[in-house]
């Protein structure tokens, strides 16, 4: 999966336009990055990558790049 | 009041609190991570036991212990002051995973609507609990008024259970994806 495709999936999780995101976007700067988005991210990771992730790992994400780094099979 | 059944979810179960949960409930509410956001703390473990004894026989008052699927107690959730088609939800503490925390909210919503047959809930959130206030608004809570609870400023919200807004739909959709993945 390309980085752009990963960003598209993260944008879907956050309900924002992909153009609003880059790998360097700081997640805490986004009002949309909340507990509902965390759940949606967990579901997306399960659905597209067959992976599970702990809440503590998600809370440690600082940037979009951190989220992208776990989006691997 | 003791709800006689266990409410089962995919990630959590909810069962009525018992006296055996007194120490757990006292400790989790007194935990410094939760202290600023939970309501009035019982002054002692014995007082917490007294509260649970009172709660168990109080009509229209349900208090659940949240368990993860390992059977570990990870939280509490109350539904109380049930009258005129409305209940207050609160006494909430939850230290679980996002999947567990979100499922608790959906299960409680279903319990209120499908078991208690009520159409509206209310909740009171301390003014310093900005995250919970934000969450309440996002899931469709309507701010009604400011109140004082235990001498502290708090916001009173009401929520219509007959309608799922986009955020509730998103939570349910995410849980459905995870349910499918778990089967």
Image: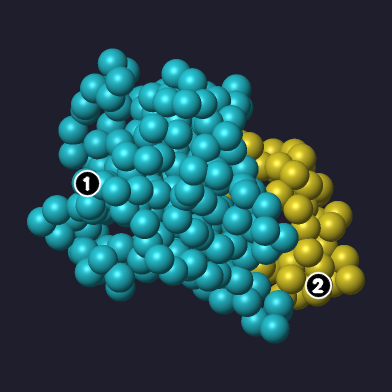
- Residue B79 appears anywhere in the view: no
Disc 2: host chain: A
Tell me which residue sits at (65%, 73%) in the image. Answer: B178
- Classify mark 2: helix, strand or loop: helix
Tell me which residue sits at (55%, 44%) in the image. Answer: B20
Q: Is residue A16 above or below residue B5?
A: above
Of labels 1 and 2, the one closer to you: 1
Q: In the rendered image, which residue does mark 2 sit on?
A: A49
Instruction: Classify residue A72 as left or right of residue A41.
Output: right
Question: Residue lying farthest left?
Answer: B84
Q: Is residue B118 above or below residue B73?
A: below
**Mark 2: few, some, or many residues within 10 Å (few <14, many ≥20)?**
few
- Residue B33 appears anywhere in the view: yes
Say which quarter of the image contains residue A51: bottom right
- Classify mark 1: helix, strand or loop: strand
Q: In the rendered image, which residue does mark 1 sit on?
A: B81
Q: Label 1 vs label 2: CA separation? A: 44 Å
Q: Position of residue B88 (x, y in %)?
A: 27, 47
Instruction: Classify residue A12 as left or right of residue B154.
Output: right
Q: Position of residue A70 (x, y in %)?
A: 84, 57
Looking at the image, how many numbered discs can be counted on the residues? 2
Quadrant occupied by the C terminus of chain B: bottom right
Question: Residue lying farthest right?
Answer: A73
**Mark 1: few, some, or many residues within 10 Å (few <14, many ≥20)?**
some
In the figure, the shade used to draw chain A is yellow
In the figure, the shade used to draw chain B is cyan
Disc 1: host chain: B
Q: Position of residue B49 (x, y in %)?
A: 45, 34
Q: Position of residue A52 (x, y in %)?
A: 78, 64
């Amino acid at each position: 999966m390309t980085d752009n495709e990963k960003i598209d999936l993260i944008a879907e999780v956050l309900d924002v336009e992909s153009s609003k995101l880059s790998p360097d976007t700081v997640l805490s700067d986004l009002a949309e990055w909340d507990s509902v988005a965390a759940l949606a991210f967990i579901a997306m990771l399960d659905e597209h990558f067959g992976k599970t992730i702990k809440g503590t790992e998600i809370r440690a994400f600082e940037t979009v790049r951190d989220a992208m780094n776990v989006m691997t099979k | 009041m003791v709800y006689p059944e266990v409410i089962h979810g995919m990630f959590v179960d909810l069962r009525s609190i018992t006296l055996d949960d007194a120490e757990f409930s006292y400790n989790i509410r007194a935990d410094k991570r939760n202290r600023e956001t939970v309501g009035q703390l019982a002054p002692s473990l014995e007082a917490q036991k007294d509260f649970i004894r009172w709660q168990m026989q109080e009509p229209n008052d349900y208090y659940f212990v949240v368990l993860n699927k390992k059977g570990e107690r990870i939280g509490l959730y109350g539904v109380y002051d049930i009258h005129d088609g409305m209940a207050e939800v609160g006494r909430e503490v939850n230290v679980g995973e996002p999947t567990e925390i979100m499922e608790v909210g959906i299960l409680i919503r279903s319990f209120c609507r499908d078991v208690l047959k009520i159409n509206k809930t209310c909740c009171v959130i301390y003014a310093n609990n900005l995250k919970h206030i934000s969450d309440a608004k996002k899931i469709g809570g309507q701010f009604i008024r400011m109140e004082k609870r235990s001498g502290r400023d708090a916001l009173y919200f009401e929520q219509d259970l007959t309608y799922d807004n986009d955020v509730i739909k998103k939570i349910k959709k995410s849980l459905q994806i995870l349910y499918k993945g778990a089967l």
